């Protein structure tokens, strides 16, 4: 019986951990964006998924890789 | 009061105060590298060329959306962020790469402060004296 409880607890723990990792990854993916600030003080956010964001984010990733 | 310094000193001050910045470069007219944190010139020039491509692409997006002139940008990715700040009407900008999830407002503040602290090198034009013969 105690062994069964232990297995259940371990499985629950692993499940929570996997869920948390997946949630954080998904949330992080949504944070990928490009913010453009204009001379009049306005801000346009181009989020990942928009076609124009793909090229901008690819160029940014390249710069980050070069900086390592 | 802001102390006027040269580009290399401004960049050194920037990296000293901002622990979030991984690499940075100050770019002058025609893409000339005025100062950078990169060890060698080739890496700095490659980085600046990439920054110019990013700015050109961002300008194209801005134009397509009918927005006024681009003054600064942040491109946030999972591996880090790229910041670019233009120096008003002057042909100068500062670009920086930071660690992931930086404090955006603080980085922009530090980059603007860096640009403002660089002394404006006016081209030296000898003035003709009023009493000089024509």
Image (cartoon, rainbow, N blue to C red):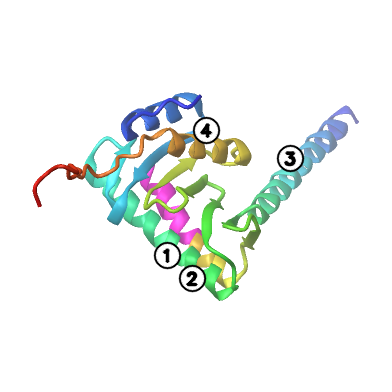
Which one is closest to the eye, mark 2 or mark 3? 2
Whole-Å distance between the Cαs marked 3 and 1? Answer: 42 Å
Q: Position of residue B118 (x, y in %)?
A: 38, 35
* Element type at mark 3: helix
Write down the residue under mark 3: A17
Left or right? Give the position of B32 relative to B54.
left
Write down the residue under mark 4: B20
The quarter of the picture where residue B39 lies is top left
Q: Chain of mark 3?
A: A
* Element type at mark 1: helix
Q: Position of residue A51 (x, y in %)?
A: 57, 72
Dot 1 or dot 4: first in sequence order is: 4
Whether the magenta-drawn stretch holds residue A61 is answered as yes
| Badge 3 and badge 1 in a common chain | no
Q: Which is the main secondary structure of the residues drawn in magenta?
A: helix
| Badge 2 and badge 4 in a common chain | yes
Q: Chain of mark 1?
A: B
Dot 2 or dot 4: first in sequence order is: 4
The boundaries of the magenta stretch are A57-68
Write down the residue under mark 1: B56
Write down the residue under mark 2: B60
Say if mark 2 contacts mark 1, CB within 8 Å: yes
């Amino acid at each position: 019986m105690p062994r069964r409880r232990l297995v259940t607890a371990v499985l629950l723990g692993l499940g929570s951990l996997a869920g948390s990792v997946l949630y954080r990854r998904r949330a992080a993916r949504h944070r990928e964006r490009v913010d453009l600030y204009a001379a009049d003080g306005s801000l346009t956010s181009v989020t990942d998924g928009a076609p124009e964001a793909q090229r901008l984010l690819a160029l940014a990733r390249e710069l980050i890789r070069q900086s390592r | 009061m802001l102390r006027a310094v040269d580009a290399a000193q401004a960049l050194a001050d920037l990296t000293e105060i901002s622990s979030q910045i991984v690499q940075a470069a100050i770019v002058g007219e025609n893409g000339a590298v005025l100062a950078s944190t990169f060890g060698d010139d080739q890496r700095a020039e490659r980085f600046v060329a990439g920054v110019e491509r990013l700015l050109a692409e961002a300008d194209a997006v801005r134009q397509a959306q009918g927005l006024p002139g681009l003054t600064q940008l942040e491109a946030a990715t999972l591996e880090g962020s790229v910041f670019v700040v233009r120096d008003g009407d002057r042909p100068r900008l500062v670009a920086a790469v930071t660690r992931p999830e930086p404090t955006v407002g603080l980085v922009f503040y530090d980059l603007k402060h860096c640009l403002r602290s660089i002394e404006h090198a006016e081209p030296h034009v000898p003035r003709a004296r009023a009493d000089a013969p024509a």
